[in-house]
Each structure stands twice: as structure tokens, then as C-alpha cells.
């Protein structure tokens, strides 16, 4: 992989905000007929490390029954708005016009759009009719790192071209207050919505250089994380084994990945991780023998936005850039598969 340049980064969130205390009480009302189940799991609201989240629909929408059609209609409307706002800001910050974008990589897994989001938003945004499109589905939380890596590879393969990467997730529309699956309660305590966008190009003035990326897929781990497709909508798959799996498997995976990219852990000045949850952050610090609290920005983003799936790691990167990008950063995210995506970003 030839290095490419990160020209800009932007984020966007929907207008509705839910505080964690409200979410807990709404969930308690919804599961009122199953008090034993809720009481057993209600501590996840208090221990999630989340103060509030941005969501795409008004509070009362989530307390009403919805099927696939209604949920996906909300996804389409909200995702297009978030896409446009994040993308427009990223293009402007890159010092470009929309018609100077040569290709778009879109990562989104929380709804279905055919034609895909960039096809729907592109004309309004001002993208050219001949812009190349690479929609990516199914990466889940790993999509922020995996999608940015894909855009970087495409930019490197065609020097001089500008590639826009956008990831949009509306996790909250999958919240299922009708389900007695413990994972549904966990999702109600964790999920938020948001979008992020970046522009990459080879060999340009930049805010950071993407010098390498890789992925690791563990076999026979498909039930650790993902979606089940059910009649009312998507049902989240969260296995309690995620944190211990990370503790046991992350360090050798990181070392193997960095070795392929010509680095070791000693070469990395800071991680930039997808904060999937407090226990996941703790597991990363434990696995890589980091000082407790090292991933402070990850905890801040989780507190302010919850788990937005793929865009979340780019919210962390945004804060890292505001504070001054360290010399060499390893971006990481876990996703369905079970997948580990990594990307090396160096200060310009």
C-alpha cells in the first residue's frame, strides 16, 4: 500500500438527543411486563459510561412498534441528511469543490439503500455524474477504519485523484423494545447515531499520512457480533465473550499486523480506537498493557455520543487531531466476522 494523504475530516450528528437517565426509564416502561429481565440487566445503563446520545427520531418514536418498512424509511431520510452534511464539510475543509471529487467510498450497515446513499445524495451535493462509487455493507463497527483504508488504497492507485469516504450509521432504529433478548437491552443502553467523512489523495498537503492498513478475520466467530434479520427489523448480536476475546487475541493480532506494515508496538505513539463500550476499552488497555485511562479520548466520545458503530472511531480521531496528531497512530476497530481492522496514520 502506497502512502496517501488525509486532507480533511468532518463529523455530523442528528438533532435529537437522549440522556441516559431518560433511556433507562423508557426501557423500564417498555419491559414492564418482564421486570426480572430488566432488573437483571438495568445496570448496563448506569455502567455504560454514556451521558447522552444523538438519535435520528423523536423519543416517542422508539416506544412505538415499527416494522422493516418504517425503520428503513427513517434510515433513508436521516442517512441522506447526515451524509450530505458530513461530506459537504469534509470537501470544504479539503479546499476542494464537490465536482473535484473523483470517487466515493460509502460504509453503512444499519439500513438498506438501493440505489446507495452516494447515488441519492451525489447530485444534490454537486458530485460529477461520472464519480466512481464504492458502497460497502456489512462491516459494522469496523467500517470506519476499513472504509477509510479502502478509500486510501484507491487514491494511492490513481495519483492525483480525490476520494471521499463517508460512513453513516443509524444504530438507534434497531432498538427493539419488543424483544426479550438481553442484547436488546444492551443495545438500548449503548446505541447512538452519527456520520463522519474524510477526503484522501496521494501526495498532497495534508493533516496526516495513511501509510498502511490491514485486517484480521477470526474463523468461527460469526455469532460474536452482527445483525440477525427479523420481521420487525434488525436484531443486534452481542456476545458477552467480546471483551475476554479481545483480551486473549488482540495483542498477537496487533503485533502480526504491525510486522506486516514494517512496525512494532514500540513504533506506535498512540492508539485511536473504536469505543464500542467501556468493557471493550478496558479490554484493549488490558490486552496491550496500556496504562489505565490511556484511551481517555475514546471514553470521552463514548460518554458524549454512545456507540455509533463505524463513525465513532473517526469522532475519536477528530479530537486527536484537535489536540495535535502524534507522530504515529494506530487506528483500530472491531466488527462482525469477528474482524479487527487497523490503519497506520502518521503526522504530516
Image: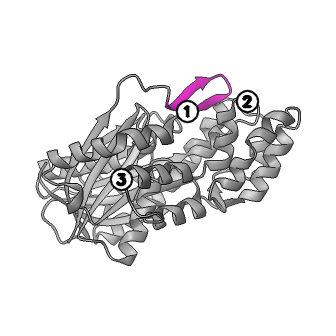
State yes or no: discs 3 and 1 in contact (Cβ < 8 Å): no
Q: Give the main secondary structure of the magenta stretch.
A: strand
Residue at 44% across, 34% down: 336
Badge number at residue 239: 1
Q: Quadrant of the C terminus?
A: bottom left
Using the numbered discs, state the Cα–Cα distance from disc 3 to disc 1 in whole angstroms.
22 Å
Which residue, given by chain and number where applicable, does mark 2 sit on? 179
Badge number at residue 162: none
Specify start and end residues of the magenta stretch as a single range: 224-236
Position in image of residue 101 (x %, y %): 26, 57
Q: Is residue 178 above or below residue 41?
A: above
Q: Is residue 257 above or below residue 36?
A: below
Residue at 60% across, 52% down: 192
Position in image of residue 320 (x %, y %): 38, 70
Which residue, given by chain and number where applicable, does mark 3 sit on? 288
| Quarter of the figure with residue 211 | bottom left
Using the numbered discs, state the Cα–Cα distance from disc 2 to disc 1 in whole angstroms.
16 Å
As rendered, which of 131 and 275 lies closer to the eye? 275
Position in image of residue 100 (x %, y %): 24, 60
Amino acid at each position: 500500500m502506497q502512502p496517501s494523504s488525509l486532507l480533511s475530516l468532518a463529523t455530523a450528528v442528528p438533532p435529537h438527543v437522549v440522556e441516559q437517565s431518560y433511556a433507562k426509564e423508557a426501557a423500564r416502561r417498555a419491559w414492564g411486563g418482564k421486570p426480572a429481565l430488566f432488573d437483571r440487566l438495568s445496570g448496563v445503563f448506569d455502567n455504560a459510561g454514556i451521558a447522552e446520545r444523538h438519535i435520528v427520531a423523536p423519543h416517542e418514536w422508539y416506544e412505538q412498534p415499527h416494522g422493516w418498512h418504517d425503520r428503513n424509511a427513517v434510515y433513508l431520510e436521516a442517512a441522506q441528511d447526515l451524509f450530505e452534511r458530513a461530506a459537504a464539510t469534509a470537501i470544504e475543509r479539503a479546499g476542494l469543490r464537490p465536482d473535484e471529487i473523483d470517487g466515493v467510498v460509502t460504509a453503512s450497515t444499519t439500513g438498506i439503500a438501493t440505489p446507495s446513499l452516494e447515488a441519492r445524495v451525489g447530485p444534490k451535493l454537486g458530485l460529477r455524474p461520472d464519480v466512481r462509487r464504492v458502497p460497502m455493507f456489512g462491516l459494522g463497527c469496523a467500517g470506519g477504519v476499513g472504509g477509510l483504508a479502502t478509500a486510501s488504497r484507491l487514491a494511492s492507485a490513481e495519483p492525483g485523484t480525490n476520494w471521499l469516504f463517508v460512513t453513516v450509521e443509524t444504530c438507534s432504529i434497531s432498538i427493539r423494545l419488543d424483544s426479550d433478548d438481553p442484547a436488546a437491552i444492551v443495545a438500548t443502553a449503548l446505541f447512538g447515531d452519527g456520520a463522519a467523512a474524510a477526503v484522501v489523495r496521494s501526495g498532497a498537503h495534508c493533516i496526516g499520512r495513511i501509510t498502511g492498513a490491514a485486517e484480521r478475520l477470526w474463523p468461527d466467530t460469526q455469532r460474536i457480533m452482527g445483525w440477525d434479520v427479523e420481521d420487525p427489523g434488525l436484531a443486534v448480536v452481542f456476545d458477552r465473550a467480546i471483551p475476554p476475546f479481545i483480551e486473549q487475541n488482540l495483542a498477537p493480532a496487533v503485533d502480526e499486523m504491525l510486522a506486516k506494515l514494517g512496525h512494532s508496538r514500540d513504533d506506535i505513539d498512540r492508539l485511536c480506537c473504536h469505543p464500542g463500550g467501556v468493557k471493550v476499552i478496558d479490554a484493549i488497555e488490558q490486552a496491550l498493557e496500556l496504562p489505565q485511562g490511556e484511551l481517555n479520548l475514546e471514553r470521552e466520545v463514548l460518554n458524549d455520543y454512545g456507540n455509533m458503530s463505524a463513525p465513532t472511531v473517526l469522532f475519536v480521531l477528530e479530537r486527536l487531531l484537535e489536540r495535535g496528531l502524534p507522530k504515529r497512530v494506530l487506528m483500530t476497530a472491531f466488527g462482525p466476522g469477528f474482524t479487527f481492522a487497523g490503519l497506520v496514520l502518521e503526522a504530516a
